[in-house]
Amino acid sequence: KKPSLFSFLSPLSLEIWIYTFAAIFTVSFILLIIARCSPDEWRNPYPCDTDYDYLENRFTVSNTLWFSIGTLMQQGSDVSPSAMSTRLISGIWWFFTLILISSYTANL
């Protein structure tokens, strides 16, 4: 029998895939909100220019989504959390992705 196009989805149930996609968006939203509220995440985009008055936060909507998806795929991203609150959320998310990927691999 020829395998179907979506046979890579078969190790986990449909509910798990739906919950995983919901978790990606939820974690991204939480990271975005907490990174915006944390003063440690705001950086000077030009660190050599000490007179520069503008600060930026690297956790944008697209960067937080990319961060969540990248950690789910065990890749990395250019954005790394520096505040304790965002590091805690990232650590919990990394542990969740480790368990999810281990479960996926075990059911292959």
Image: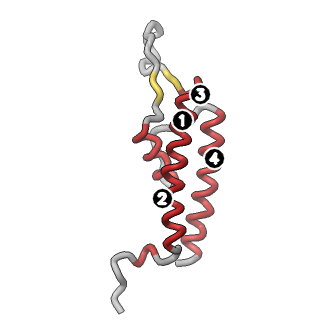
**Are discs 3 and 2 less than 8 Å apart at CB?**
no
Name the residue tied to disc 3.
Answer: 38
Name the residue tied to disc 2.
Answer: 21
Q: CA distance from mark 4 to mark 3?
A: 17 Å
Which residue is at 61% across, 31% downward? Answer: 83
Amino acid type indicated by mark 4 = Gly
Viewport quadrant of the N terminus: bottom left
Question: What x and y, as percent, mark residue 10?
Answer: 47, 77
Is 32 placed above or below 107 here? above
How many marks on residues?
4
Foreground mark, 2 or 4, reads 2
The kind of secondary structure element at disc 4 is: helix
Task: Name the N-terminal-most of marks 4 and 3.
Answer: 3
**Mark 2 Cα shell of 10 Å, populated few (<14), some (14-19), many (≥20):** few
Task: Name the N-terminal-most of marks 4 and 1.
Answer: 1
Is 39 placed above or below 16 here? above
Foreground mark, 4 or 3, reads 3
Name the residue tied to disc 4.
Answer: 91
Task: Name the N-terminal-most of marks 1 and 2.
Answer: 2
Foreground mark, 3 or 1, reads 1
Q: Nearer the viewer, residue 15 or 38?
A: 15
Q: CA distance from mark 2 to mark 4?
A: 18 Å
Name the residue tied to disc 1.
Answer: 33
The kind of secondary structure element at disc 3 is: loop
The kind of secondary structure element at disc 1 is: helix
Q: CA distance from mark 3 to mark 2?
A: 26 Å
